[in-house]
Image (cartoon, grey):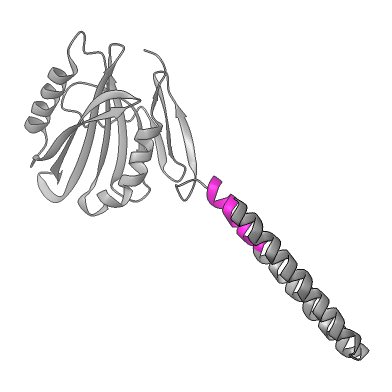
Amino acid sequence: MLIAEGACRLASEQLDMGFYVLFYFSEDMTDNYRKIINVVIMTSFGFIILVFSSFHIFGILGAVAPSSSGGVNLYEGTLFQVLYPSNWIKEDIPLVRYTGLESLPEVAFYVPNQNVEVIISTERPGNVPLSEYFSREVIALQDSVTGYESVGSSKTKLGNVTALEVSYIGSMVEEGTIYGQTKTMELVTIFQGVSYFFIYRAEISEYSKYLPAVQEMIQSFVFKRA
């Protein structure tokens, strides 16, 4: 701290000396030269002020700008709330269901013109441990997903509650013809007697691109009440 103060004082003294020297020499100059020197000095200080102001403004913008390029919207349901990218399409009570076990799709979020989606479903499974319920879901997925190929499973969090995660690859099928592959990440948890399925599904080529936005959605997920 003392070193910094000493440096500041030294810089101030040198700046004052510089002004004194400029003023001294300017006394012997013609009026035109003095005018030129004054313009140069004023222009230099104006540039310094502009640069520091720009750094300050950019610093503020960087601190408050949302990480998603288009900002975020809030979805607020009966049981939970979650933030989602504002340039995604929201669908209440979607007709599709990607869980292996029975569940009720509550809301879906789609990337326009892309096979990329997040669907959140719920169910009331009764008094069952999460580990057992998760095992049932994985077995049901293996039986129902065409071309199921496990990528892995792990322990994670959803709404600050312990959740279990499974990732897998499946085939895209239309009228019995396989035309591509998708990668799916599914989080399963139970909170106050309600099971929650947070599912991110995308074509393999697009999966990594949108994963950061989906991870932000997971981090923003909050339980309300059951």
Instruction: Residue at 6%, 30% (x, y): give it.
Output: 143
Label tally: 0
* Residue 183 vs residue 38, the one in the foreground: 38
Instruction: Residue at 14%, 25% (x, y): give it.
Output: 137
Across and down, in percent, residue 43 comes to 76, 75
Relative to 50, is 37 above or below? below
Q: Can residue 141 be seen in this view?
A: yes
Question: Magenta region's main secondary structure?
Answer: helix
Q: Is residue 46 visible?
A: no
Across and down, in percent, residue 33 comes to 86, 89
Quadrant of the drawing holding the C terminus: top left
Residue 211 as seen in the image, left or right of residue 4: left
Instruction: Find the magenta span and give its range.
Output: 52-64
Across and down, in percent, residue 193 comes to 28, 11
Relative to 27, is 49 above or below? above
Instruction: Residue at 72%, 70% (x, y): give it.
Output: 14
Which quadrant of the structure image shows residue 139? Answer: top left
Residue 23 as seen in the image, left or right of residue 214: right
On whether residue 138 falls in the magenta region, the answer is no
* Residue 32 vs residue 213, the one in the foreground: 32
Instruction: Residue at 86%, 79% (x, y): give it.
Output: 23
On whether residue 57 falls in the magenta region, the answer is yes
Which quadrant of the structure image shows residue 51? Answer: bottom right
Relative to 18, is 211 above or below? above
* Residue 54 vs residue 174, the one in the foreground: 54
* Residue 19 vs residue 166, the one in the foreground: 19
Relative to 22, is 70 above or below? above
Which quadrant of the structure image shows residue 108? Answer: top left
Residue 40 as seen in the image, left or right of residue 116: right
